[in-house]
Amino acid sequence: MDAQVGINTTNLSSAAVLHLEAENVQTTKIGGFLMPVVTESEQSSIPVSISDDRDDGLMVFVSDPVTGKQCWDIYDGIVHAWRSINCLNVTCSGDILFVEDFDSYVGDTGVSGVTSSSGDYPSGVTKWTLTSFESYGSSTPSLPGTLLDANDFALVQSGKLALRDTNGIFQFQTQEIDISGYTDIGISMEVSTGGDLEYAPSQHIDDFTCGFDNSDYFDLAYSTDGGISFTKITNYIGLGTINHTLVDNLTGTVTVSVSGISGTSLIIRVRLQTWAADEYYYLDNIVVSCN
């Protein structure tokens, strides 16, 4: 049976299945629509579907006196994540919104050419993923992919993520980080190298055609639209190129940082490559904070 519902009105919109008017014609009182109000903990207990899109568009208002979040959230049933559509201003006091220091994982866990399925990642929602690719130059994710043997890996070692001899692009990427309500988000990450990394611009047709050898680089990028597009940090403090964040050997530890980011969610992506068994990149102390 086809039906429409009207509250405080008999002149229903033909486009609406539920039509609410602000004024009660009998009492002449004006009112508004009050959606369910929940804390962040209560929101996380809502049994939304993670297998199909049946809950796409589900709405709540998050008002949490502990975290300070006050946001109108809508459930995205396609990617199965809550998205903050609009938030009241959140006071910035140096809040840490995400941190990864790689200290909580068992040593020598991650992925390698012979044990691509191993890993000691957080239970439940994974904080980050590691991805190799089908072959050099391919955009098809595949593990072990270009990790050719046990000496090719991305493993947690001594409280850092160590990446060795990737033979092409290797990717580290966080899950979506909630930054809703903030206007000046910053990312910082410590990067160091081991062995003899090389980057020879004269051997490149252009800065994207980076083939074998002499093509060791590190790229940091971030997305505020759920991973649809990414903004790459290029030529960081003169240690990169017009298309790469860092290239060649690094002296000591370099803290790559960027600020002034705003939005409702943040994804951090690192792509890098090395081409020899004695060439390493090390990642540590990844922090997202309100500046």
Image (cartoon, helix red, strand yellow):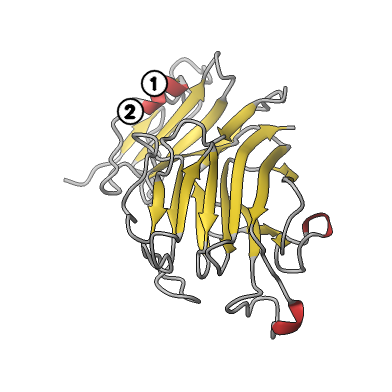
- Indicate the position of residue 12 as horizontal and vertical percent values: 39, 41
Q: CA distance from mark 2 to mark 1?
A: 7 Å
Question: Where's the N terminus, which quadrant?
Answer: top left
Q: Amino acid at mark 1?
A: Glu
- Indicate the position of residue 277 as horizontal and vertical percent values: 52, 64
Q: Quadrant of residue 230?
A: bottom right
Q: Is residue 120 above or below residue 230?
A: above
User: Looking at the image, which residue is at 48% across and 27% down?
Assistant: 61
User: Looking at the image, which residue is at 39% across and 56% down?
Assistant: 112
Residue 226 visible in this rendered orientation of the protein: no
Nearer to me, 9 or 174: 174
- Indicate the position of residue 209 as horizontal and vertical percent values: 63, 80
Residue contact between numbered discs 2 and 1, judged by CB atoms under 8 Å? yes
- Indicate the position of residue 108 as horizontal and vertical percent values: 42, 44
Is 116 on the left-hand or right-hand side of 147?
left
Q: Secondary structure at mark 1?
A: helix
Nearer to me, 138 or 74: 138
Q: Secondary structure at mark 2?
A: loop
Please identify the residue farthest to the right as the structure is shown. Answer: 238
Question: On residue 42, which mark appears?
Answer: 1
Q: Quadrant of residue 181?
A: top right
Please identify the residue farthest to the left as the structure is shown. Answer: 1
Nearer to me, 281 or 53: 281
Is 254 on the left-hand or right-hand side of 180?
right
Is 60 on the left-hand or right-hand side of 207?
left
Q: Is residue 168 above or below residue 154?
A: below
Q: Which residue is mark 2?
A: 46
Q: Amino acid at mark 2?
A: Ile
Question: Where's the C terminus, which quadrant?
Answer: top right
Question: On residue 156, which mark appears?
Answer: none
Residue 243 visible in this rendered orientation of the protein: yes
